[in-house]
Image: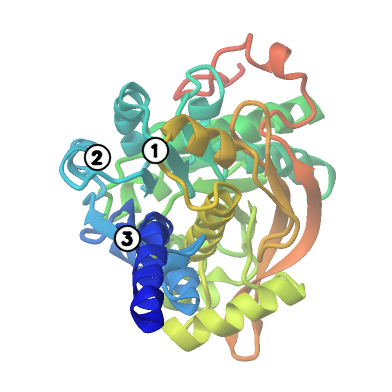
Amino acid sequence: MRNQILKVLLIGFFVLSLPALVFSQEKQIKIGFIAPLSGPMAQIGKDMVDGTTLYLNPIGNQMAGRKIDLIIEDDENVAATGLTKVRKLVEMNQVSMVSGGALAAIGYAIQPYVDSKKVPTLVPVIAADDFTQRKRAKWMVRTGWNASQVMHPFGEYAYKVLGFRKVAAIGMDYAFGWELLGGFQRTFEESGGKVIQKIWCPTTTQDFSAYITQINREADAVLSMLAGRLCITFVKQYQEYGLKGKIPLIGAGTLTDESVLPSMGDEALGIITALHYSAAIDTPANKEFVKNYREKAGKLPSYYSEACYTGMRWIDQTLISLKGDVSKLDRILKAMQSVKIKETPRGPIDVDAYGNIVQNVYIRKVERVGGELQNMVIQTYPHVSQFWKYKPEEFLKLPGYSRDYPPIKP
């Protein structure tokens, strides 16, 4: 009789415990992720995925005690495709949050949709300025950067440290290129310099001959705002046309990012750029990250790799603070906005009141170290805001950086 009573009690206890068991083992948390996995930016997309999975795999694809179902989609680096893929992730896959994307145009395309659907969205790479400025995205948190953020200190550095007075600029003809140049031009000219030329090229450019021959030879330096495979072609042709050694080449950090640097040779030596990451950052956190990434991918991590690795860590911290409960989207967003991480491969990071990252900006110079090209850090600007040294309210009264703003002064 006592055995039967004990069995009944055990069964009752098990039944009463079911809700807790179900909650801890309920369906996976679905996270949607988009990246350019085909076309000229495919290496960038691969680096993004490698960085993401490098974080997830060692923790058994679990966050806050729940399995993570990462659903990856190829946005083909096309704005319309990116929007279609995000719709699919939200409406068909029913993801709890979205991350990824590389092209600024994709970001601007998906922003109205995720805001209207109230989908918490983490932005680890897309650098479109106005996401976190004049057209602030309500449901996006950016853990990557915005284009002008890294170029504000670089404009000042180019004038005060490098001693340049006249700069000719060449870049991709869309928001990313315009905003990179805008940030540089503003601080460079406020310091006393002058941008004397703007040359814009399509993102599909395969031969830069027609653009390189236009460069004003009176420039003290040429500033390049390119990304992906375009960088490899441009840097090589810059040397072939005899400009290397005559007019210094500088640029946004994507020009010599580790996603393209292994495909370059001596033509890249000496190029100085600005970015919020370098694989050569000399800290324990970055050394460990570089070591693990080399083992996984067989090469140095790019900024795209680090951005998505740290982006997944940001999501992990978000879910830990929620104890894995993703039932209320507004709580996910609030938790995502509140994360601060003191040690990442790129350094300490947090977000400002506008949803944009605050972080170090590094001035890097390409050198050959241990038989391979690396972006060696030559100066660090700590805790840089998207508004640089300006007051946000004053900054936002001015037009956003565009193809023609700031204008070339006569």
Query: Which amino acid, mark 1?
Result: Ala
The label on residue 276 is none
> Is 103 situated above or below 405?
below
Residue that numbered label 2 is attached to: 90
Residue that numbered label 1 is attached to: 104
Residue that numbered label 3 is attached to: 70
State the CA–CA distance, disc 1 to disc 3: 23 Å
| Lateral position of residue 263 relative to residue 154, left or right | left
Tell which circle, 2 or 3, labels the residue nearer the N-terminal end: 3
Tell which circle, 1 or 3, labels the residue nearer the N-terminal end: 3
Q: Residue at x 52, y 51 (%)?
A: 319
Give whichever of 244, 102 is nearer the camera: 102
For the N terminus, the image quarter is bottom left
Q: Position of residue 5 (x, y in %)?
A: 38, 74
Do the CB atoms of the residues marked 1 and 3 lie less than 8 Å apart? no
Give whichever of 342, 150 is nearer the camera: 342
Secondary structure state at the residue bearing disc 2 = helix
Q: Position of residue 10 (x, y in %)?
A: 40, 72
Query: Which amino acid, mark 2?
Result: Val
Q: Residues within 10 Å of mark 2 (few under 14, many from 20)?
A: some
> Is 359 situated above or below 235?
above
Q: Residues within 10 Å of mark 3 (few under 14, many from 20)?
A: some
Asked which quadrant contains residue 218, the reply is: top right
Asked which quadrant contains residue 203, the reply is: top left
For the C terminus, the image quarter is top right
For discs 1 and 3, the disc positioned in front in the rendered view: 3
